[in-house]
Amino acid sequence: MTAQTYVPSLAVRLGTVCVLTLAVTGASTLAPGIAPEASAAAVASRALHVAASKKGSPYQYGATGPHRFDCSGLTLYSFKEAGRKLPRSAQQQYNSSRHVTASSRKAGDLVFFHSGRRVYHVGIYAGNGRIWHSPKTGDVVRLDRIWSSAVWYGRVG
């Protein structure tokens, strides 16, 4: 069914006022909770794209971009460019994210490497067991496989 035949048919059944209301609200009233989740997914996708665009940028402790980054500086910068504010450190980013399981992780989620209860590194999940991150002094922003099972995942809302 095309949009041309669908809208008049819908207008006849619901009335013009209802169709206009749906158009203005973006139909989010039909499925509450879907719009915020879709918005978070769009932000995560944009942040992932920003991180990937920084491939080859050198690591520098304490740097938050736009040309040099440490690990949490890359995630902070990427989400800032996507329209979301994150705290500065990897631990603070973990504390402020919505924690998700490995089985429900999605591209654009944050990946936190930890030792015990202490988070020491963060990257952005790219899918297929890979992350974009700024690893260490002397290295550059790059795509790597997740090398440890001691990871937690967080979603930026």
Image: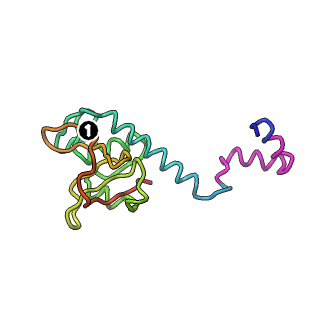
Asked where in the image residue 46 lies, by quadrant, the reply is: top left
Question: Quick check: is 36 in the magenta stretch?
Answer: no
What kind of residue is marked 1? Answer: Arg
The residue depicted at 23 percent of the width and 42 percent of the height is 134
Asked where in the image residue 136 lies, by quadrant, the reply is: top left
Q: Point out the residue furthest to the front here.
A: 128
Asked where in the image residue 114 lies, by quadrant, the reply is: bottom left
Q: Position of residue 40 (x, y in %)?
A: 48, 50
Q: Point out the residue furthest to the left here.
A: 138
Q: Does residue 151 lie above or below 25 as drawn?
A: below
User: Magenta region: which residues?
Assistant: 7-28
Drawn side of residue 36 relative to residue 129, left or right: right
Of residues 152 and 103, the one nearer the viewer is 103
Drawn side of residue 5 relative to residue 132, left or right: right
- Main SS of residues in magenta: helix
Q: Position of residue 1 (x, y in %)?
A: 76, 40
Q: Position of residue 62 (x, y in %)?
A: 19, 45
Q: Position of residue 53 (x, y in %)?
A: 34, 33
The residue depicted at 31 percent of the width and 55 percent of the height is 93
Give the residue pinned by disc 1: 142
Q: Point out the residue furthest to the right here.
A: 12
Drawn side of residue 62 relative to residue 36, left or right: left
Look at the numbered disc 1 and give the secondary structure of its residue.
Answer: strand
